[in-house]
Amino acid sequence: MKIFAVRDEDNTTNKAVAYLFYYEKEKRFYIELPEEADPWETPLILSSFLKKGQKTINAYWSRIWVQQRIVPSDRQNLGMILRDNGLDFYDEYKLLTMTNGRCSQDSYYLEPISEKDLPKEFVKRNQQKVEDVIPLPENQLLVFFRDGCVKKHDLVQLAGTDKRFAPVLRNENTFRAVNVETDGYGICWGENLCIECGKLYAAGKRVPLNMEEFKCFVRERVVDSAEAAEELTCSKQNVDDLAKRGKLHPIKEGAKYRLFLKSEVMQRKWK
């Protein structure tokens, strides 16, 4: 993961007006806005979220902000531009960082920072990210958060009038394909149909788990060494080695098998 502070050259305080996170393996961008963010200082496309009380910008709109700052993929002389900059193919991240995120439309730029440089408020936000999600009968979702909170959601209520969710609500197999977004930023069905973690944390009903729901969790989110190897695109021997070195933590193991939480295996991919 790469982290950048978004700063404004015209702002004499040099404070960060936003933070950009980039996950290299998934090639996904996310933008976080500070708690004290000012709509007048925030980049225009992001300030509309701030006015609605949203501090976390989803992957779709974060990428739109990035794309507005780089050469468009449909540029007529794109091949020549890429060659002139030593690129073999169109790479949004490399194009963005080559100019430190600068563009002719405004005075914002990117400055690389480390995780320890993030505001303390981000520790709390990180704890409210999604740890795992379990599809239950009748379009119900059981969502686990990193702070230990567990909430039950009705997707019909979450989706509201958003017609994009109609295929998910109509087809049980599609509904059960729900997954956790990169680094717990929400839940999703594919790349573009997502519900962000802040909305999930604020809504829903906090409930204790019962046995049937726990069994459902085991069926959906416990994987063996072979399945873990498939997710990590490595061999079973590599998975066993990760377990021996404490990089993966089996929830149950015997002489000839190990079982893992799928969420931990997925998090390993994000490292």
Image: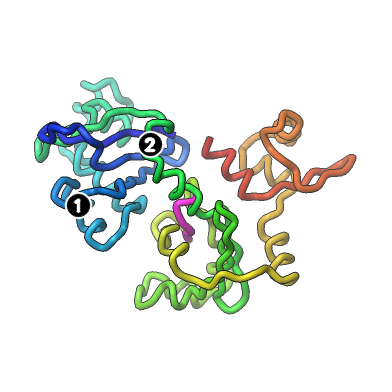
Question: Which residue is label 1 attached to?
Answer: 45
Residue at image position (53%, 74%) is 171
- Residue 242 lies, in percent from the top left, at 70, 32
Give the residue at x 24% y 27%. Answer: 82
Judged by its main secondary structure, the magenta piece is: strand
The residue at the point 58 percent across, 79 percent down is 138
Comparing 62 with 224, the one in front is 62
The magenta segment is: 184-188
| Towards the viewer: 112 or 136 | 112
Q: Is residue 195 above or below residue 97?
A: below
The numbered dot on residue 169 is none
Image location of residue 108, percent across then percent down: 17, 36
Which residue is at 76% across, 47% downward? 251
Q: Tag count in the figure?
A: 2
Q: Where residue 95 sits: x, y (%)?
A: 26, 31
Dividing the picture into quarters, in which one does residue 142 lie? bottom right
